[in-house]
Image (spheres, grey):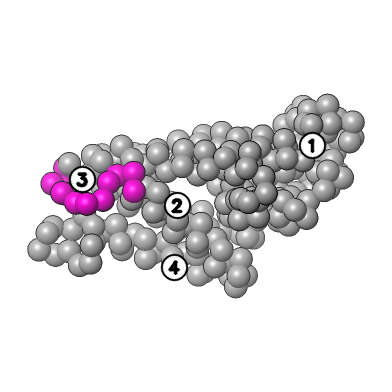
Amino acid sequence: MPRPTKQNPERGDARKRLLEAARDVIRTQGFAATTVDDLCKAAGVTKGAFFHHFENKQALGVAAAAYWAETTSAFFADAPYHQHDDPFDRVIGYAEFRKDIIAGDLAEFTCLAGTMTQEIYGTHPAIREACAASIFGHAATLEPDIEAAMKERGIKADWTSASLAAHTQAVLQGAFILAKATGDRAIARESVDHLKRYIEMLFAPSGEREGP
């Protein structure tokens, strides 16, 4: 996942620098605790520049969620799991890739959209909707491979490719919360291991399946 660069945000126009700063600072200290001054300092811009591009912090939050979706989409589009010929291997490869990128500090691997959603879901509906678009938009990228794997393996079930794709995000967001609660990324990696096992059980031959 795109790595934060707290001390030296990527150079570029002021708007992009503010969005990069929001990505880094909000993942580190949360949306509510982040001030416009914090963002300006991290981005190396003036408050005048901030208010030239954003009406207020909420507008910045909406734009940051959209920017997060854009940059992470590009990151995952280039991920190695797409290279597998078998769609099931691509689904499993996605889980393995998500585990591999749980590395470094909490702010380096946790999700900006998830972090903001946990704080603002009841107070900033525009940000909540932008975060939902990011999370569910990413989930939707998994659906074609899940659907193809279901067809290839003859899976007939009361669950859908969309519901399984959404469940992967529920597990990942929960894993991030556990990592934040413990300060230990290992518990998040273990959660992804369980997700991988669950997917393997769902796609196992009927006589070998356990659970749903």
Amino acid type, callout 2: Gln
Q: Quick one: SS at disc 4? A: helix
Where is mark 4, residue-wise?
A: 190
Tell me whether circle 2 and circle 3 mark residues in contact (CB < 8 Å): no
Marked residue nearer the N-terminal end (4 or 1)? 1
- On the image, the x and y values in percent for residue 57 come to 77, 40
- Residue at 63% in and 38% down: 126
Mark 1, Cα crowd under 10 Å, few <14 / some 14-19 / many 20+, is few
Extent of the magenta region:
152-163
Left or right for 199, reference 123: left
Look at the numbered disc 1 and give the secondary structure of its residue: loop
Question: Marks 1 and 3: CB-CB under 8 Å?
Answer: no
Q: Which of marks 4 and 1 is in front?
A: 1
The disc placed on residue 150 is 3
Considering only order in the chain, which callout, 3 or 4, is on the residue closer to the N terminus? 3
Res 157 label = none
Q: What whole-number distance in Å separates the C-alpha atoms at marks 4 and 2?
A: 15 Å
Separation of residues labelled 4 and 3 (CA atoms): 25 Å
Up the image or down, 137 lies above or below 13; here it is: below
Kindly identify which residue carries mark 2: 169
User: Relative to 37, does residue 183 appear above or below in the rendering?
Assistant: below
Q: Where is residue 75 in the image (x, y as percent from the top left)?
A: 52, 39
Task: Determine whether the residue tagged by mark 3 lies in a helix, strand or loop.
Answer: helix
User: Measuring 43% from the left and 65% from the top, which residue is drawn there?
Assistant: 191
Check disc 1 and give the amino acid type: Asn
Which residue corresponds to mark 1? 56
Q: What element carries label 2?
A: helix
Please tell me which of labels 1 and 2 falls first in the chain.
1
Q: How far apart are marks 2 and 3 (CA)?
A: 19 Å
Give above or below for 192 relative to 56. below
Q: Is 42 colored magenta in this rendering?
A: no
